[in-house]
Amino acid sequence: MATLNPQHAQVLVPAGVAIVVVALTHFFTSARDRENKRREQRISYLVGVFRALCKANNHPRLYEVAEEVEQAIADIQLFGTPEQIRLVQQFATDLAKKQHAEMNALLESLRDSLRKEIGATRTNGHVVWFRVGRKQDNEN
């Protein structure tokens, strides 16, 4: 049986340690990159959801933005927190039954979680709505 002489050990041990360090670094870097990608994708979807619901809120002709609202509801059920999923399901149920639904709690929850994700401080108060009226094409 061959024995490991001290000169070989001086080379092999640091080489082995270096290989383990490289493997661990790669593993942790890959895990961090995957988590960052998931976070970026979730933020992107939820910003789109927030914008779509803001656009739909108090829209004079909801049917014009119906497809965006439907997609927003689906995206929240996929990417939202359990509380946001509950709120969007309540919103969808109320909208289907009553043709009117309250979405302030949902939008505030989305706003708060998005601000937390991007490192912004939490805000207090309700979302304020601003809608500019447009003249109809046939009016002067």
Image (cartoon, helix red, strand yellow):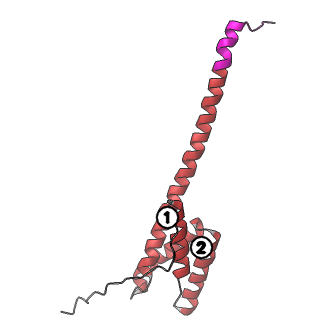
**Contact, CB < 8 Å: mark 2 with mark 1?**
no
Task: Residue 26: name its quadrant.
Answer: top right
Which residue appears farthest toward the right when viewing the image? 1
Magenta stretch: residue 2 in it? Answer: yes
Label 2 vs label 1, nearer the camera: 2
In the image, residue 81 lies at what x, y percent?
A: 61, 68
Percent of width and height locating residue 72: 50, 73
Crowdedness near tag 2: few (<14), some (14–19) or many (≥20) residues, C-alpha within 10 Å: many
Q: Which residue is mark 1?
A: 45
Image quarter of the C terminus: bottom left
Residue drawn at 54 percent across, 51 percent down: 36
User: Which amino acid type corresponds to the residue marked 1 in the rendered image?
Assistant: Tyr
User: What SS does tag 2 mark?
Assistant: helix
The residue closer to the viewer here, 104 or 121, is 121
Question: Residue visible at 23% across and 88% down?
Answer: 137
Magenta region: which residues? Answer: 1-14
